[in-house]
Amino acid sequence: MNNSNSITSRRRFPRVGDPSTGIDQKTYANLVLYTKYASASYMTPCPRPLGNTLVGEFTNIVTAMHGFVARDDKRNEIVVSIRGTKEVSSILIGVADASVMLTPLQGIGLPPSTSQESSEQPRVHTGFLVAYQSIAHAMLNVLGPQIDAYSTYRVIATGHSLGVSSYPRSLCVCISLFIAHQTQGAIASIASIAIRNSYPRTSISLYTIGQPRTGDLMYAALVEKMIGVENIYRGVHSIDGVPTMIPMKFGYRHHATEYWQFTELSTSEHVKRCEGGEDPEGSGSIPSSGVNPAHWVYFGQRGSSHCSHLFLPSTLFDSDCI
């Protein structure tokens, strides 16, 4: 190998020999679709998310949490979209910040602990749990009647939905639970198990974008058990440092399943389906650089631009919130 080729090889990202072979086009299209729902969650008001029925919204002015429930009658799908926070770095981690401490998973809709010992309970980031609690009641109040009214909706987007084989297909409704950039990927993760626990006959697909580590190993195992690894789509864009910003040395672990866009441009061939929660060949192989430009663009969609959607014309805006 000559010197110029050697330089090119060293600069290639990811490294030469990466085992990724891409993902199928349908999975990629779904990742793009739910990223657009994330953009719509920044738009207030958003009367018809992606042209679909807006069922209701929920907001907590203290925690600045906001989201909506939409219904897509063509895809037979209910979508819960929760807006991300603008103060990502301050909420995510600060060694002196008590919110980064792990606390037992307890709250509205969440499954009861099977142990009285806190060390044997799933634990999550204290700040994320507080944020979830602030909108949990309102979110479930908007969502519940939809599940009751549309109980005949079929499972959408995956054939591997946990719990479908245990219940008649006519009693299943697919909720593609998607959350925007930043800390709110963590809130979606917590909310997904609350929905599963509250509505055990409901099939859930969990889509998160740029999700930071949310809880410990027991929490990761709980999410995988209740939702199913085949129904979890945890998107990571190239060198986005947010997903690994909270270090494992604090007791945190990711749950499956990571879909890592390992290089540009955004295409199905450039996304790798990783193994387990902390795949050494996934995004965790890149040292975290915190909040960086990769965090604001996912699967070709710019989430941050929609924080100022009333002032920035955008083709994406027109299609995301009609």
Image (spheres, helix red, strand yellow):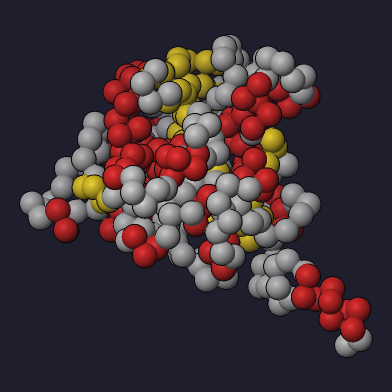
Q: Is residue 186 above or below residue 58?
A: below
Q: Residue at x 54, y 35 (%)?
A: 180
Q: Is residue 124 above or below residue 51?
A: below
Q: Is residue 146 visible?
A: no
Left or right of 120? Residue 134 is right
**Quadrant (top left, top right, bottom left, bottom right) of the C terminus:** top right
Question: Which residue is depicted at the point 30% across and 34% down?
Answer: 130
Q: How many marks?
A: 0
Nearer the observer, 95 or 148: 95
- Residue 292: x %, y % from top left: 63, 48
Task: Say which quadrant the N terminus sits in.
Answer: bottom right
Does 203 sit left or right of 280 as displayed? left
Residue 225: x %, y % from top left: 33, 54
Picture quadrant of residue 117: bottom left
In the rendered structure, the answer to whether residue 199 lies left or right of residue 149 reads left
Dividing the picture into quadrants, the one containing residue 256 is bottom left
Q: State the residue at coordinates (24%, 31%).
A: 108
Q: Looking at the image, can residue 177 be seen?
A: yes
- The image shows residue 226 at horizontal and vertical percentages of 33, 49
User: Relative to 245, is 125 on the left or the right?
Assistant: left
Q: In the current view of this chain or complex, which residue is farthest to the front?
A: 96
Q: Is residue 294 above or below residue 169?
A: below
Q: Which x, y percent locates residue 44?
A: 56, 15
The residue at the far bottom in this view is 1
**Residue under the image location 74 percent in, 20 percent down:** 312
